[in-house]
Amino acid sequence: MTWSQLGLVARQVGSDLWAQLWTHVLTAGAMAMAMLVFGLFLLLQENLQSLLKGWGDQIQVNIYLNKSLGATEVSLLRETIQNYPEVERARYISQEQAWKDFQAALGSQSNLLEGLPQDVLPASFEIAVKAAYRDGPIIEAVAERLRKEQGVAAVEYPQEWVNRLSRIVLAVQGLQWVFGGMLFVAIFFIVGSAVRLSILARKDAIEIMQWVGAPPELIRGPFVVEGLIQGISGAALSVLGLWSLFLFLHNQLATPMDPLGSLGQLQFIDFQSVCFMVGLGGLLGTLASVFSLRRFMTTWKG
């Protein structure tokens, strides 16, 4: 296509966008709504993965000791645990320290503990696991070995929650592409309908161009560019809507909810995901235009 033809296509696109402004605005808006749903899945997946990583970084095993265990036995047990190849560090928490920590956790409601003996909480070890061993089966094996150590009353670790969250992330990824496929089909119909309206509005001009032997790319070019613009515009609007929703949720859910340590704040999708959404919108708009053009242009030419 020559520069003069490119200029003609650009002028035709500008003219058609202005002449059918509201049609294109409504098409881009409908695309934005569809892409927004897909973006919500991306946002949910991003934050679940961040949450999973945060929990994984904070995985620790808590072991509670028998109250009859003496200081020498506690020291020997700490040395034994610290020699585990999977263990990064083992922090001993005495009964007195456990009581103080419990009071601090209750804050202004610590008066509820009045009357309770301070040795009601057992001494314990908080065991941090090395990053290379933060895997479900390995953590379970370590916990099983700890249960067999003399003086250990109970062993707890949050791996079950991490495993559940991993399954949720996988489910979200699957739903993202199932619903995404449905939405992409809808986008095809939305953009295709807009292209068909544009074709019908310029039917006479198209037929004249066909009869005088205008190159196919010169006839189809404006429609393809319009589909591309609609796709990019719709995707950009969906990212803007997703950002507004993110800011709202970020302010509403600013307080920490934390059974396993700080979960951090909500995170927006990364720049790569934003580019993916915009590029996907442009690609879908272009493909929908090409598909509609092949049907209608072939019919008229015949």
Image (cartoon, rainbow, N blue to C red):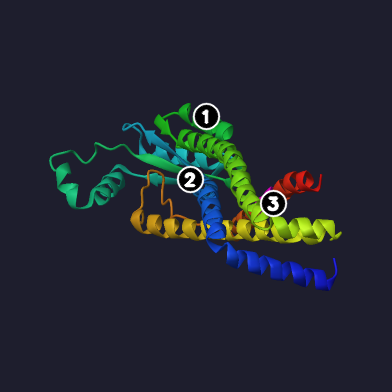
Q: Report whether residue 4 is seen.
A: yes
**Where does the magenta region start and end?**
283-289
Where does label 3 land, which residue? 289
Q: Main secondary structure of the magenta part?
A: helix
Give the vertical position of 166 relative to 245 (above or below). above
Which amino acid, mark 1? Arg
Mark 2: give few (<14), some (14-19) or many (20+) Cα within 10 Å: many
Kind of element beneath mark 1 = helix
The label number, if any, that marks residue 206 in the structure image: none
Q: Amino acid at mark 2?
A: Trp
The numbered mark at residue 145 is 1
Residue 200 image offset from top left, x and y in percent = 66, 52
The residue that appears at 52% across and 60% down in the rendered structure is 22
CA distance separating discs 2 and 1:
23 Å
Q: Is residue 188 left or right of residue 210?
A: left
- In the rendering, at what x and y percent does residue 241 appear? 47, 58
The residue singled out by tag 2 in the image is: 55
**Residue 84 position by quadrant:** top right
Is residue 285 in the magenta section?
Answer: yes
Could you tell me the amino acid type at mark 3? Ser
Q: Nearer the viewer, residue 193 or 181?
A: 193
Helix, strand or loop at mark 2 = helix
- Mark 1 crowdedness (10 Å alpha carbons): few <14, some 14-19, many ≥20: few
Q: State the separation of the CA atoms marked 3 and 2.
A: 46 Å
Q: Residue at x 42, y 32 (%)?
A: 155
In space, the residues marked 3 and 1 are separated at their CA atoms by 63 Å
Q: Is residue 299 left or right of residue 251?
A: right
On screen, residue 294 versus residue 82, left or right, reads right
